[in-house]
Image (cartoon, rainbow, N blue to C red):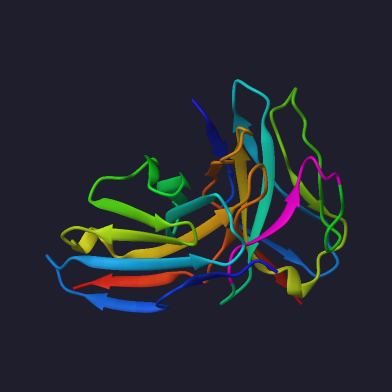
Amino acid sequence: DVKVTQSSRYLVKRTGEKVFLECVQDMDHENMFWYRQDPGLGLRLIYFSYDVKMKEKGDIPEGYSVSREKKERFSLILESASTNQTSMYLCASSGSNQPQHFGDGTRLSIL
Amino acid sequence: AQRVTQPEKLLSVFKGAPVELKCNYSYSGSPELFWYVQYSRQRLQLLLRHISRESIKGFTADLNKGETSFHLKKPFAQEEDSAMYYCALGGGGATNKLIFGTGTLLAVQP
């Protein structure tokens, strides 16, 4: 069974802080994704990666960056956290032409 | 532009009643359509994929290219079906990037 693990279920940070959200998958998947999930807006893609050190912007990349140094790990970075980045963040991974598998999510609050 | 529309934010039905969760899409190529489900306090998980043409937990969905729809149906709702349902559109290809709808909360009343 595919395992996508997000490092924190809940996280509270202050405005202006640099925030790291970590995601690890154990299925040797090429593709990894970061979404934010907001009520009434569904899931919106922030960034995705199709290989180590490769990344592409999604629909809402502003204020975020990502890092993929190893195939199994995909990090989302909030360069300078702001209150409008308070949200649920979901990580997913998939093999080539395969459905995406999701982690449990990180509920991030920016105070 | 690629888009997925789920017109209902909330669908409330009684146990045993039929269920239809609507999904319409806009895509110029050959689409791949998915239904994902999120039960309370659980992770988002794949329910159906249109190319599989299978029934999961009694749910089915048929891709109608003429109407650009992929509605999710179940003849008799159960209380355990209560969850948030998301329709998602993929353009195919190795990355299988998805566009999600805004979701429909299904509430099955006893």
Q: Is residue A31 left or right of residue B30?
A: left
Q: Is residue B62 above or below residue A101?
A: above
Q: Is residue B83 above or below residue A99?
A: below
Q: Is residue A23 magenta?
A: no
**Residue A67, how many percent across, how many down?**
33, 55
Quadrant placement of the C terminus of chain A: bottom left
Q: Is residue B48 magenta?
A: yes
Rendered image quadrant of residue A7 = bottom left
Residue at x-position 49% and y-position 25%:
B1
Residue at x-position 87% and y-position 54%:
B55
Numbered circles on residues, count: 0
**Residue A54, how many percent across, how many down?**
40, 43
B39 or A67, which lies in front? Answer: A67
Quadrant placement of the N terminus of chain A: bottom right
**Residue A70, how many percent across, how many down?**
43, 59
**Residue A76, how many percent across, how many down?**
34, 59
**Which segment did they paint magenta?**
B43-53
A97 or A51, which lies in front? Answer: A51
Q: Is residue A31 above or below residue B47?
A: above
Q: Is residue B86 left or right of residue A9?
A: right
Residue at x-position 34% and y-position 67%:
A21
Q: Is residue A90 left or right of residue B105?
A: left
Q: Is residue B33 left or right of residue A66?
A: right
B2 or A9, which lies in front? Answer: A9
